Amino acid sequence: MRRHLRFRTPIGIPEGYIRLESGDFGWDYIIRNYDGRYHLIQTDYDYAGIASTFGWRGHTHGETDGTIDCPVCGRKVGTMLASAQNYLDNNVGKMVPDPGYFDGE
């Protein structure tokens, strides 16, 4: 079901949504919400979790979140994190409902 997004803030993000932005260094990312607050993502071990928030489905076994080697097929962490980073790079600007990154702040 697609919801009609009526309210857009001055920074162009609908209320209740987050947007993926690139950081200043090429390997970092920013998750920004509708009122301008943001989280800076600087660690490659965060790439898989952040990428999955924005739609990445990098490993299908379900045995790993991408931060440990897959015990089923042996796919290495570095391969999965590189895949997640590639996904993030290709989806800068994407907006998704906020799953709770800014709750309680």
Image: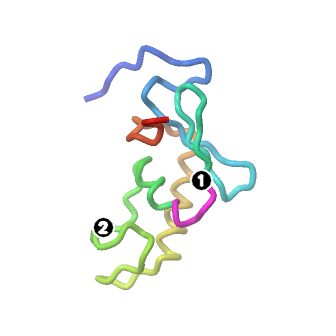
Location of the N terminus (image quadrant): top left
Question: In terms of depth relative to the viewer, which is nearer, 82 or 31?
Answer: 31
Q: Is residue 42 magenta?
A: yes
Residue at (55, 18) in percent of width and height: 9
Please indicate whether residue 99 sits to the left or right of residue 27 in the image.
left
Q: Position of residue 55 (x, y in %)?
A: 40, 49
Q: Is residue 73 magenta?
A: no
Which quadrant of the view contains residue 72?
Answer: bottom left
Residue at (42, 28) in percent of width and height: 16
Examine the rendered structure and indicate whether residue 47 appears above or below residue 23: below
Boundaries of the magenta span? 41-46
Name the amino acid, label 1.
Ile
- Residue at mark 2: 60
Examine the rendered structure and indicate whether residue 51 appears above or below residue 35: below
- Residue at mark 1: 41
Question: In terms of depth relative to the viewer, which is nearer, 48 or 105?
Answer: 105
Please indicate whether residue 25 sits to the left or right of residue 22 in the image.
right
SS state under label 2: loop
